[in-house]
Amino acid sequence: MTKIAQPSVAIIIINWNNYDDSQKCLHSLKKCDYPNFKTIIVDNDSHDGSGSKLKSEFGEFAHFIFSDINRGFSGGNNLGFKYALGEGFDYVMELNNDTEVEPDFISKLIEAIDDKPEYGAAQPLIFYNTPNRQTVWNAGGKLLRPLGISLTNHENSKNPETIQGSEVDWITGCAFMIKSDVIKKSGLLKEFYFFGSFEDVDLSLRIRNLGYKLWLEPASVIYHSVGSSSKSKTKGKEGYLNPRVHYLTQRNQMIFINHHTPAIFKPLAVLTQVIKLFAYSLYFIVLWRPVKLKMVWTGFIDGLFKTYHD
């Protein structure tokens, strides 16, 4: 009997001035047991030579794309998506470069949804990449659409063995595996989100609007060094987290509300964000983070009143 070929998988990783994390991620991918996958590295206009250094080390293992500008998380992944779709891969996956994976994580994801046409995408169970690797960071997401709020499932985070495979409202961009036929219908990531948040929630919702379901597969496991790409290595006057991340996160929240919250609920969603921002403001005033204070309010105003479209 002829053995049916296993579906082809393209794994897209963004590198931006971060050789150490990207190298660890690639070393872990080289240990994967799935026989039909290809890694695609998109270097987002790094200025530290990390992209060239990675290519010299992993050039035979991965395909490299060098962007002439920093296209952000959304735009960088879209470069990888376009290449993968053009090459005819059956699945495409965006994977954060600050992750490390279990050898069977691809196999388990494919097993979970490949024979289920109702499912368009899946994600693994994601643990914090700490020494014990036993606390769950992400087990899929919930969406409170009337409020425009996305929540990460943290139930049983200390007891991961109790987490079951299940349908979820949205999948994190940290590890988002999509059937190629589905993303051709849904469209790629919206590049106006750039970086920060909600590009994954937006794509998840567009996939669901096509009638597909999203799946969390806890047998597939990866580990995430949370915030590695958005934090400074040294603490400055505004803390470790780049103030622009606060701007983009709040701006993207409001863009998402404008695009996906039903009109009847939009005033409530905006009011919820205003209340949240007053709480943030008090926090930033107490710690005296004036730049971050300005950034979150500027992000709120820009996201609420500016028009963002493809």
Image: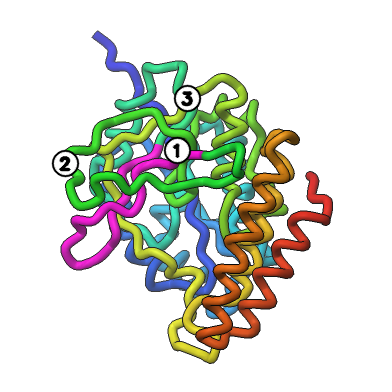
- Secondary structure, mark 3, is strand
Type of amino acid at the residue the image marks with label 1: Met
Residue 187 lies in quadrant: top right
Q: Residue at x 59, y 78 (%)?
A: 47
- How far is mark 2 from mark 1, CA to CA? 22 Å
- On the picture, is 24 further left or further right than 132? right
Task: Pinpoint residue 92: horizontal percent, then vertical percent.
Answer: 49, 38
- Quick one: label 1, few (<14), some, or many (20+) residues within 10 Å? many
Type of amino acid at the residue the image marks with label 2: Glu
Tell me the number on the disc at residue 161.
2
Q: Label 1 belongs to which residue? A: 177
Q: Are marks 2 and 1 in contact (CB under 8 Å)?
A: no
> Which of disc 2 and disc 3 is earlier in sequence?
2
> Which of disc 1 and disc 2 is earlier in sequence?
2
Nearest the eye: 192 or 39:
192
Q: Residue at x 28, y 16 (%)?
A: 3
Q: Which residues are magenta?
A: 123-143
Rendered view: 16 above or below 164: below
Q: Label 3 belongs to which residue? A: 213
Question: Residue 266 in magenta?
Answer: no
Q: Residue at x 55, y 43 (%)?
A: 201
Residue 3 seen: yes
- Quick one: label 3, few (<14), some, or many (20+) residues within 10 Å? many
Nearest the eye: 184 or 224:
224
- Secondary structure, mark 2, is helix
Task: Pinpoint residue 91: horizontal percent, then vertical percent.
Answer: 47, 33
- How far is mark 3 from mark 1, CA to CA? 13 Å
